[in-house]
């Protein structure tokens, strides 16, 4: 039973995000009525098939592949390639939906709703007759190349082959020649946090632990000073409209989000005497919790080193910033995440070890901590099925994602 729950766990986590797509119960701010109507229509799921391209479109204009968009929008394409959006259908999701597509197609489709939401990215669809659901059938419009790209340009910018985007920042002159794909429709909603809400916020009835929705970033933003000041997701994650979407996997972005101070309170002059240091991690630069999801954790570690730089046994002490839950999502172990504007304090209190020459304080970020445990459990339990090779790759990726965010050393007298 445990293995079966593990095999569908990530599917549940991802699939429950579909509840976010009907979010009239989630308050919205800084939206005009026109923007609200646009978003309601724009983010229907799955995104309806594009249909036949206009007769005057070239093959490239009719394409939904990001590399074809990149032929003209080269900067945006290069930036998108480095983002997690381009990896939304990575080996972890792909490995699970490979099996799920056959055994539980409805849940697979829910996963795709955020990770590959275009109809053309989904290998199966529901055949309907007179409005009644009949059966799952192969999708004749399915493009496996498009599916592998995850959150493509078209997911946000193309509907029925019409292009949508934010208004131009400066007036531009158009020559006498033909405008590619008929130009675009300017919509101010592209610059509002609510545009991101569909995939980054569960609805009020979504899956929760201890009264907290598993995906709650938009609500966290609403409760921060950022919302009150009109600072939106795009202002930090798409600076100057760059298609980067940097987050906790990126050390530079993470450093901008927190302020770390270390205060030495007791020196520990001799062996056995108290050595005490206080580390404060303040969430000064993110408009949501740090971290916002249950997948990462941040370790605050103190340890004493000998003259050769070796860690002295018994001297290590650590604190954890994160939201830790059981792998089956049935229980919350603890939640030490830092709300926007708040702080976390870690107190290193240990007797000075004989031979200690330095005290080292550092922060280690493990962006995929939950997934590393989850994929390892799947592999050890034999529940990966025909997606085993992909799950193993996902596990390796998760194992290799940690990095050191901060370090400070104190010489001990």
Image (spheres, rainbow, N blue to C red):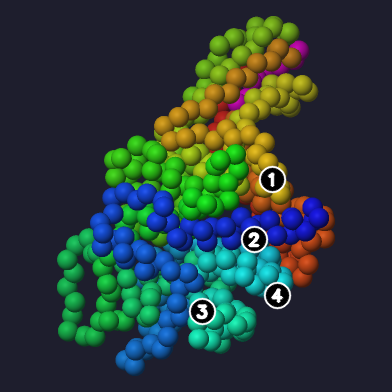
Label 2: state its secondary structure: helix
Q: Earlier in the sequence, mark 1 or mark 3?
A: 3
- The answer to which of marks 3 and 4 sits earlier in the sequence is 4
- Looking at the image, tell me whether mark 4 or mark 2 is earlier in sequence order: 2
Query: Does the rendering let one see residue 107?
Result: yes
Q: Which residues are magenta?
A: 354-361
From the image, tell me which residue sits under label 1: 330
Q: Is residue 335 above or below residue 36?
A: above
Q: Which mark is residue 102?
A: 4
- Compare marks 1 and 4 and give the one earlier in the sequence: 4
Which residue is painted at 35% across and 51% down in the image? 28
Label 3 Cα crowd, 10 Å radius (few <14 / some 14-19 / many 20+): many
Q: According to the image, label 2 marks what residue?
A: 11
Contact between marks 3 and 2 (CB within 8 A): the answer is no
Q: Is 302 left, or right, of 170 in this rendering?
A: right
Q: Which residue is mark 3?
A: 120
Q: CA distance from mark 3 to mark 4?
A: 18 Å
As measured in the structure, the alpha-carbon distance from the residue carrying label 1 to the one carrying label 4 is 26 Å
**Real-space CA distance between mark 3 and mark 2, rounded to the nearest whole angstrom:** 20 Å
Label 4 with label 2: CB-CB less than 8 Å:
no
Q: Secondary structure at mark 3?
A: helix
Residue 169 placed where, x, y %? Answer: 22, 60
Nearer the observer, 239 or 332: 332
């Amino acid at each position: 039973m445990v293995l079966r729950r593990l095999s569908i766990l990530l599917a549940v986590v991802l699939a429950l995000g579909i509840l976010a797509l009907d979010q009239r119960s989630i308050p919205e701010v800084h939206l005009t009525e026109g923007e609200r109507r646009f978003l309601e229509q724009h983010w229907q799921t799955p995104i309806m098939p594009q249909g036949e391209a206009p007769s005057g479109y070239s093959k490239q204009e009719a394409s939904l592949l990001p590399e074809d968009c990149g032929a003209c929008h080269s900067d945006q394409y290069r930036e998108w390639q480095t983002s997690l959006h381009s990896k939304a259908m990575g080996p972890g999701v792909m490995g699970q939906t490979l099996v799920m597509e056959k055994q539980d197609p409805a849940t697979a489709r829910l996963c795709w709703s955020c990770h590959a939401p275009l109809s053309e990215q989904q290998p199966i669809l529901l055949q309907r007759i007179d409005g009644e659901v009949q059966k799952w059938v192969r999708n004749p419009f399915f493009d496996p190349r498009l599916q592998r790209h995850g959150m493509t340009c078209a997911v946000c910018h193309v509907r029925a082959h019409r292009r949508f985007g934010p208004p131009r920042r400066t007036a531009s002159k158009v020559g006498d020649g033909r405008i590619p794909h008929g130009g675009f429709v300017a919509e101010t909603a592209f610059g509002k946090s609510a545009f991101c809400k569909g995939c980054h916020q569960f609805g009020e009835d979504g899956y929760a632990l201890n009264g907290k929705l598993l995906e709650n970033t938009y609500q966290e933003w609403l409760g921060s000073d950022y919302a009150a000041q009109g600072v939106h997701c795009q202002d930090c994650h798409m600076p100057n409209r760059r298609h980067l979407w940097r987050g906790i996997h990126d050390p530079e972005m993470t450093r901008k989000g927190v302020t770390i101070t270390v205060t030495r309170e007791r020196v520990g002059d001799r062996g056995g005497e108290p050595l005490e240091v206080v580390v404060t991690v303040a969430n000064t630069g993110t408009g949501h919790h740090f971290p916002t999801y249950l997948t990462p954790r941040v370790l605050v570690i103190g340890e004493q080193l000998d003259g050769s730089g070796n860690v002295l046994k018994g001297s290590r002490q650590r604190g954890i910033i994160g939201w830790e839950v059981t792998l089956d999502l049935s229980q919350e172990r603890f939640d030490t995440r830092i709300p926007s504007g708040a702080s976390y304090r870690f107190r290193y209190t240990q007797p000075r070890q004989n031979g200690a020459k330095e005290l080292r304080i550092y922060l280690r970020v493990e962006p995929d901590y939950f997934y590393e445990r989850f994929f390892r459990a799947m592999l050890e339990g034999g529940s990966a099925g025909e997606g085993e090779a992909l799950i193993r790759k996902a596990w390796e990726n998760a194992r290799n994602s940690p990095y050191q965010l901060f370090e400070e050393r104190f010489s001990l007298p």
